[in-house]
Image (spheres, rainbow, N blue to C red):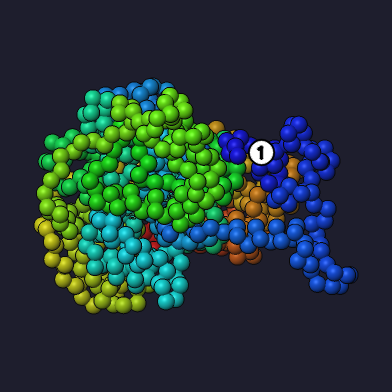
Amino acid sequence: MDTTSSKTTGGFADATPGPGGEWHQTAGGDVPVLTTSQGIPVSDDQNSLKAGRRGPTLLEDFHFRDKMFHFDHERIPERVVHARGFGAHGVFETYESLSDLTSADLFQRAGEKTDIFVRFSTVAGNKGSADLARDVRGFAVRFYTKEGNWDLVGNNIPVFFIQDAIKFPDLIHAAKQEPDRGFPQAQTAHDNFWDFMSLTPEAMHMAMWIMSDRTIPRSFRFMEGFGVHTFRLVNAEGKSTFVKFHWKPVLGLQSVVWNEALKLNGMDPDYHRRDLWEAIQNGDYPEWELGFQLFDEEFAERFAFDVLDATKLIPEEDVPVRPVGKLTLNRTVDNFFMETEQVAFQTGNVVPGIDFSNDPLLQGRNFSYLDTQLKRLGGPNFTHIPINTPRCPMAHFQQDGHMAMRNPKGRANYEPNSWGGAAGGPREDPERGFRSWPEEMGGQKLRIRAELFADHYSQARQFFISQTEVEQTHIKDALVFELSKVETPVIRERVVSHLRNIDDDLAQKVADGLGLKSLPDAVAPARAVVQGLKPSRKLSIALNGPKSFKGRKLGVLVTDGTDAALLGELEAAAKAAGALVELVGPTVGGVTLSDGSVREPKQKVNGGPSVLYDAVVLLPSADGATLLTGEATAKDFVSDAFAHAKFIAHAKTAAPLLAKAGVEADEGVIALSKGGAEAFLQKCAALRFWAREAMVHAV
Ligand code: HDD
């Protein structure tokens, strides 16, 4: 099946015309006749075959049986982690030849374009969970290169919870629903998770990241991606360079605030997938730059942390990120199940010129991803599913198995053989084929971790001090929120004991937020905390935001009598700024503006809360504003925007609504009059008026 082109025929996606190039039977025009899965035309799809007018259904009804049998088996197991995800197609363009670094074919030529499939995901929630769960986001990228599939299976956070893959089942058991009760769903705010975390000091750096706004991104489009592990690039001469992979969103970083996330999960559980879908459908293609952090053995030796430890990162100030190409997502999937659900990423999918490091987390992943696909996709032939099929020639002797779509042709199904030439089938190529980098190995077999892995707090502290004040407050608030849901006091205290090794002030504030009577002693660190690590600007979201309001969305509250000229000016300014405008009104049926024109709001006010938007504009007429003061959701629209530190522009006529919502004028609340739209949008590039936040959150 061709998943690369849009279908023109509805119904079964594999509907293809008969051998003559024509539909054998049509139900009029090019509408095909409904058939069973065996191709037998169906006369009646409304009634099962019965014995007599009121008699039982007959077993003979093969159409009923065929239909019901297939339906009964539609589900496959969801992913054991990252069950909820959303995918899209795109293209990766290489900026310049990197042949000095790697022989990977996709990096040999400037301007080379490689097809891509990306799947973003949350980790802990089940397939039907909400998008704005506080969680790590998966950022899995498949490059369909001319020398096979390369999967860069990353996250939106550059470090991980654990150092050794052997702990992964424990981590995930602890994070997911508790096994006796089957809840809570898609959240880490529960005893089991924090129990495991507090007994796993290596997780403390990650704890800082997951309690930061990184785990509540505004959109997949505004988050970074990281390959996490150290990998190797190997060039044609066999020279190896260590590399860490980074994805940087061209539109800058952005997250929501926690109270907003909680509300979004109810108002639009599909907020992230809808955002990506709409952006691509609108031609507003999301872009990321791929960057390499390159370093050699000498740097690895002198760096204060072990580059094989996935709980550590290398600050960009120490090793800068070199941009090497751009990813553009430009096509939504044709079918969610065929593509997004069946895509089988594997960290083990590397191409010649890219190799693994000895990171024990990566080594374990290389087993797990292949293994899990067998369970999920039901057999070894999942590369026959189009989304998993390499887009380059393949030649091997693998055959048979469940659902085999392609067996090698001819007599030879083994090698060596005596059949010679093409009849003998493919042969290996020591030059072009994948060769593992010949690293020297030796020593005893041991179940241990290398010494520097025992440093658990230094980079956690570095991350914390790299945040702006607002972001530090969010980390504190998140810890207090999560730990307040933990029922066992000793677990809460144990977490605070770890925080004392990260930042004493943070530990004190969290202890206060939890109502602890006294500050518990610090956990004794297994290895001395490295002092004097400098803040890294790149670790903050706020310091890496957008330069403009491009790609963001304005929610505009309108009513009958809304000033048409003001709205028109605002819409023109938003268009020029590359921002979207969505109208919210008392009904979706239409509002009549001051000039008599009629506009249909996209949302009714009770279904279009301000959490859906990056900034809001209140343009009700005087009568409209009075009407809306009687509508609780209109008041929430305004008071939430205010509490979430959003920029609010308003016509003079909106005054009663502002008063009802308890809005106090500040520099983020802007009276909009003719000629002011452009300036307002420029202000919105800051995304939030953070100075307000401290005024509206006392505890
Ligand atoms: Fe994993 C899925 C990312 C550690 C085992 N992982 C999965 C996906 C992403 C990641 C993005 C979703 C792929 C998709 O969209 O289909 N995982 C990571 C990152 C890790 C990580 C960045 C640490 C650096 N994972 C990790 C470990 C193990 C796994 C240590 C096991 C040893 N991950 C899996 C899995 C999944 C998976 C069980 C579930 C579904 C799948 O693989 O295809 O094999």
Residue 258 picture quarter: bottom left
- What residue would you read off at disc 1? 7
Q: Is residue 7 visible?
A: yes
Q: Amino acid at mark 1?
A: Lys
The residue shown at (54%, 54%) is 270
Within 8 Å of ligand 1, the CB of disc 1?
no
Establish if 180 lies above or below 264. Answer: below
The residue shown at (60%, 57%) is 74
Q: Is residue 297 left or right of residue 120?
A: left
Q: Is residue 677 visible?
A: no
Q: Is residue 329 left or right of residue 559?
A: left
Front residue of 223 and 294: 294
The residue shown at (45%, 34%) is 412
The residue shown at (66%, 42%) is 14
Quadrant of the image containing the C terminus: bottom left
Mark 1 Cα-neighbour bin, 10 Å: few <14, some 14–19, many ≥20 = few
Residue ranking furthest to the right: 53
Q: Position of residue 76 (x, y in %)?
A: 53, 58
Front residue of 698 and 297: 297
Q: Position of residue 530 (x, y in %)?
A: 13, 52
Q: Position of residue 170 (x, y in %)?
A: 32, 65
Establish if 289 lies above or below 183. Answer: above
Residue 44 picture quarter: bottom right
Q: Position of residue 634 (x, y in %)?
A: 60, 60
Total numbered labels placed on residues in the image: 1
Quadrant of the image containing the N terminus: top right
Q: Secondary structure at mark 1?
A: loop
Residue ranking furthest to the front: 418
